[in-house]
């Protein structure tokens, strides 16, 4: 009897993870079409965050419905992290294609944009300071590091969203 909810939870994580992953790709493509992939507008970040929160919460709501209205914080975190992990894996496949096929000069262009931003913010930077800052930035300007950071950041925010949503939505048999 315990096995059926386990299968259903995995199915919910998979379905909502796929939805979130493809929604993330669509938002990234919209940002690309708009044309400012190196300094995205704050509205893109806001919409992306809202979509992530909504999809995770909908997945948790589905789990709660499946469990006769009960949801623990632990179950919320497991489910939310599952949704987030599946989404992140889908998104990093897109990023890999993006960095290597769609925009192969992405990291070089990003370094140029960052250099320009540093010069605007810190006009008194010496050449040595600028080179040190560029060297520091360039350590993370490669596909492997960027994909790794994407997964870690996604899981971190998925954990926070799941924890908060779980605390708000939790209901145990003692509460009934």
Image (cartoon, rainbow, N blue to C red):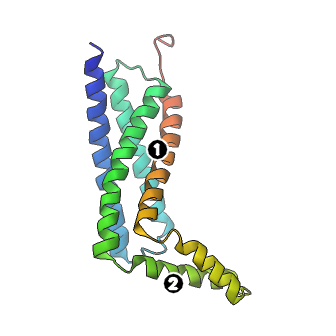
Q: Please, what secondary structure does the residue beneath circle 1 have? A: helix
Q: CA distance from mark 1 to mark 2?
A: 31 Å
Q: In the rendered view, would you say 101 is above or below 158?
A: below
Give the image quarter of residue 59.
Answer: top left
Q: Residue at point 26% right, 40% down?
A: 15
Residue behind mark 2 = 112
Give the image quarter of residue 85.
Answer: top left
**Callout 1 crowding tier (Cα within 10 Å): few <14, some 14–19, many ≥20:** many
Residue behind mark 1 = 158
Residue 93 point in image, percent of width and height: 30, 59
Q: In the rendered view, would you say 88 is above or below 7?
A: below
Labels 1 and 2: the sequence-earlier one:
2
**Labelled pair 1, 2 in contact (Cβ < 8 Å):** no
User: Where is the N terminus found, in terms of image quarters?
Assistant: top left
Q: Is residue 120 visible?
A: no
Q: Is residue 151 left or right of residue 67?
A: right
Residue 103 point in image, percent of width and height: 33, 77
Residue 161 point in image, percent of width and height: 49, 41
Say which of 95 and 136 sits in front: 136
Q: Please, what secondary structure does the residue beneath circle 2 have? A: helix
Q: Residue at point 29% right, 48% down?
A: 19
**Callout 2 crowding tier (Cα within 10 Å): few <14, some 14–19, many ≥20:** some
What number of labels is visible?
Answer: 2
Q: Is residue 87 left or right of residue 151?
A: left
Q: Is residue 99 left or right of residue 156?
A: left
Label placed on residue 137: none
């Amino acid at each position: 009897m315990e096995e059926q909810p386990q299968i259903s939870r995995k199915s919910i994580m998979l379905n909502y993870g796929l939805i979130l992953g493809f929604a993330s790709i669509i938002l990234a493509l919209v940002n690309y079409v708009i044309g400012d992939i190196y300094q995205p507008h704050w509205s893109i970040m806001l919409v992306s965050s809202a979509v992530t929160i909504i999809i995770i919460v909908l997945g948790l709501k589905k789990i709660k419905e499946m469990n006769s209205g009960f949801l623990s914080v632990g179950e919320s975190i497991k489910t939310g992290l599952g949704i987030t992990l599946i989404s992140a894996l889908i998104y990093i496949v897109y990023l890999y294609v993006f960095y290597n096929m769609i925009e192969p000069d992405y990291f070089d262009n990003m370094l140029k944009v960052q250099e320009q931003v540093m010069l605007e913010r810190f006009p008194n930077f010496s050449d040595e300071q600028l080179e040190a800052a560029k060297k520091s930035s360039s350590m993370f300007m490669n596909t492997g590091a960027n994909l790794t950071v994407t997964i870690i950041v996604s899981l971190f925010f998925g954990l926070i969203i799941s924890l908060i949503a779980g605390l708000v939505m939790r209901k145990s048999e003692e509460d009934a």
